[in-house]
Amino acid sequence: MNYLYQRMLEEETTAVFDKEQLKKFDEYITKNYKEFYENKIPYEIKKEGEKFIVTLFDTTHITMKDILLDIVK
């Protein structure tokens, strides 16, 4: 989990997830689909080994920090 926060601090648009965390991210997107769709918030998921790098391309309405604080609860 420390690597996740280290990467988040470096770039508020990017987070590194393991498989379980990616599932929580996906659930967050599903739960907040309307906000993502209405505000046209694009994101990208890249797989590197056992980790997934998730990048938000528009942080006007929501930041990766907001998402992390919600899914880490």
Image (cartoon, grey):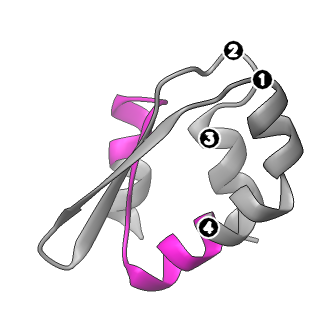
* Image x and y of residue 4, in percent: 39, 58
Residue highlighted by disc 2 = 60
Could you say which disc has been placed on residue 26 in the image?
4
Q: Earlier in the sequence, mark 4 or mark 1?
A: 4
Pointer 4: residues within 10 angstroms few (<14), some, or many (20+)?
some
Of tags 2 and 4, the one toward the viewer is 4
> Along the polypeptide, which appears first: circle 3 or circle 2?
2
Task: Identify which amino acid the numbered label 2 is placed on.
Answer: Thr
If you read the primary sequence from the N terminus, does the residue marked by circle 2 or circle 4 appear first?
4
Q: Which percent across, then down, holds residue 11?
A: 38, 29
- Find the distance from the CA under tag 1 to the CA under tag 3: 17 Å
| Mark 2 residue element | loop
Q: Quick one: label 1 or label 3, which is nearer the N terminus? A: 1
Label 2 neighbourhood size at 10 Å, few (<14), some (14-19), many (20+)? few
Circle 1 is placed at which residue position?
Answer: 39
> Is 20 a magenta residue?
yes
Identify the mark nearer the N-term, 2 or 1: 1
Q: Nearer the viewer, residue 10 or 49?
A: 49
- Looking at numbered disc 3 in the image, what kind of residue is underneath it? Lys
For marks 4 and 1, give the CA distance.
17 Å
Residue assigned mark 3: 65
Residue name at image x 72 percent, y 30 percent: 62
Left or right of 29 on screen, residue 22? left
Image location of residue 71, percent across then percent down: 70, 66
Q: What residue sits 76% from the left and 22% below the top? A: 61
On screen, residue 49 above or below 66? below
Position above or below: 15 against 65: below
Between the residue at mark 2 and the residue at mark 1, the CA separation in whole angstroms equals: 9 Å
Element type at mark 3:
helix
Q: Which mark is residue 57?
A: none
Q: Which residues are magenta?
A: 7-25
- Contact between marks 2 and 1 (CB within 8 A): the answer is yes
